[in-house]
Amino acid sequence: MDSKIKLKTKIEYAGKSYSINSVNGFDLSLKNNFDGKNPIFFNAKQSSITAIQNEEFTGDLMKGGSCNVYTANVDIHCNGTHTECISHINDVQIKIVDVCPNELIPSQLISLKPEKISDTKDSYHVNLTSELVISQKMIADKIKNPVESLIIRTLPNFKFKKSRNYDENPAPFFTSEAIEYINELSIEHLLVDMPSIDKADDGGMLGNHHAFFKKGKTISELLYISNSIKDGFGFLQIQIPNWNLDAAPSRPIFYPM
């Protein structure tokens, strides 16, 4: 007998009715195993855990403790899936708990194969040579109507992303025109499987971040989107801990329609 509780939710959106089964959501986050095999970016250290220990207590069952009590050390932006807001780049009082939605939000998942900047007509705010980018045309070919949230899977979608060192194997990023087009689509929540929507070293400008946050609310980075999930429309829930910071580790759950 299946002991799982299956909840069905009926959603009315844009004049159409949709039904969501609670067990059919796809987790788009990377699991952090604290084993030194997570993706890393920007010369970050791997996430780690340390058992609390003093003269009277050891927080490690393997060392004779009565229970496990760990301190976790995580670089939010560079070790795994996370969601950030405008205070990541601007000195404002808005924090991620203020703008990350609690409710299900309409979302579109698309897959794109980055191309060399020299093969596009787009630009970027610093000089580029042969870097791989996501251009405006690539997005426009996949989606033309306003949508509240956009999830982008880059191709090829190897499992290598789950442990990739992005300093040794640089990731693609968006062109300036691509971000402008995303803003034109009224996208409030942008989710990507890359470590950043900007080039890793753009002189500290973070130009795409500044451009997106003129209209957008959250950016989620370092996702892993399984090949088993088809492109298309669905509903998204971005789960975060109640941390009053510019960003927090996150667990986006996608319910494809």
Image (tube, rainbow, N blue to C red):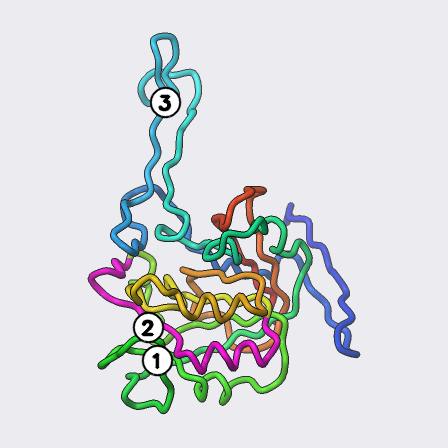
Q: Reading the chain from its start, which is encountered first: label 2 or label 3? A: 3
Residue depicted at x 78% and y 70%: 12
Query: How many neighbours does mark 3 have within 10 angstroms: few (below 14), some (14-19), or many (20 or more)?
Result: some
Residue depicted at x 55% and y 42%: 243
Helix, strand or loop for disc 2: loop
Whole-angstrom CA distance, mark 1 to mark 3, is 45 Å
Q: Amino acid at mark 2?
A: Pro
In the figure, residue 21 lies in which quadrant? bottom right
Residue where numbered disc 2 is placed = 172
Q: Amino acid at mark 1?
A: Pro
Query: How many neighbours does mark 2 have within 10 angstroms: few (below 14), some (14-19), or many (20 or more)?
Result: many
Numbered range of the magenta stretch: 164-187
Residue sitting at the far top:
56
Question: Label 1 near label 2: C-beta < 8 Å?
Answer: yes
In the figure, residue 232 lies in which quadrant? bottom right
Residue 257 shows in the view: no
Counting from the top left corner in percent of width and height, residue 257 is at: 63, 73
Q: Reading the chain from its start, which is encountered first: label 1 or label 3? A: 3
Above or below residue 144? Residue 59 is: above
Counting from the top left corner in percent of width and height, residue 182 is at: 53, 77
Left or right: 137, with 214 as reference point: left
In the figure, residue 241 lies in which quadrant? top right
Left or right: 236, with 65 as reference point: right
Residue where numbered disc 1 is placed = 114
Q: Nearer the viewer, residue 230 or 173?
A: 173
Residue 248 shows in the view: yes
Above or below residue 252? Residue 57 is: above
Above or below residue 247? Residue 137 is: below
Residue where numbered disc 3 is placed = 60
Whole-angstrom CA distance, mark 2 to mark 1, is 7 Å
Question: Label 3 near label 2: C-beta < 8 Å?
Answer: no
Residue depicted at x 49% and y 71%: 211
